Amino acid sequence: MDYKNYLEKKEKGNAEIITAGGGFAIAVKKFDQDSGDPIAPEITSIDLETLQKEKKDLQDKIADIDSVIADINTLKTS
């Protein structure tokens, strides 16, 4: 999922988080290319637990990168 794209569309009023089927989804407004009239939105389900795991995995990766950077900086100052 492209979170930045979602946030940009949300800022313009073209996307939102909705409840769907006991869970959550992202609804993105769609428009007819010829007339510009609204058509059925694109609905993509999202799972909070999956998002939280993805966030944790990214935080762990950042911590690993920070450790490698610290090792390099230690060598640079030696």
Image (tube, grey):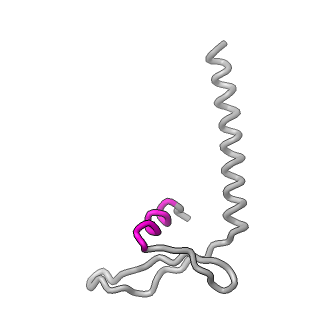
Q: Where residue 53 appears, x then y in whole percent?
A: 72, 60
- Any magenta on residue 10? yes
Q: Main secondary structure of the magenta part?
A: helix
Q: Residue at x 58, y 79 (%)?
A: 18
Quadrant of the snapshot with the C terminus: top right
Q: Residue at x 70, y 39 (%)?
A: 64
Question: From what the image shows, is residue 77 above or below residue 8?
Answer: above
> Residue 61 falls in which quadrant of the image?
top right
Question: From what the image shows, is residue 78 above or below residue 15?
Answer: above
Q: Which is nearer the eye, 35 or 7?
A: 7
Q: Where residue 12 appears, x then y in whole percent?
A: 40, 69
Q: Where residue 62 appears, x then y in whole percent?
A: 66, 43
- Any magenta on residue 68? no
Q: Is residue 72 left or right of residue 37?
A: right
Quadrant of the snapshot with the N terminus: bottom right
Q: Is residue 15 left or right of residue 47?
A: left
Q: Residue at x 68, y 48 (%)?
A: 59
Count of marks overlaid on the render = 0
Q: Is residue 77 left or right of residue 43?
A: right
Q: Residue furthest top?
A: 78
Question: Which residue range is magenta in the image?
Answer: 4-13
Q: Which is nearer the eye, 72 or 51?
A: 51
Q: Residue furthest left?
A: 34
Q: Residue at x 49, y 80 (%)?
A: 42
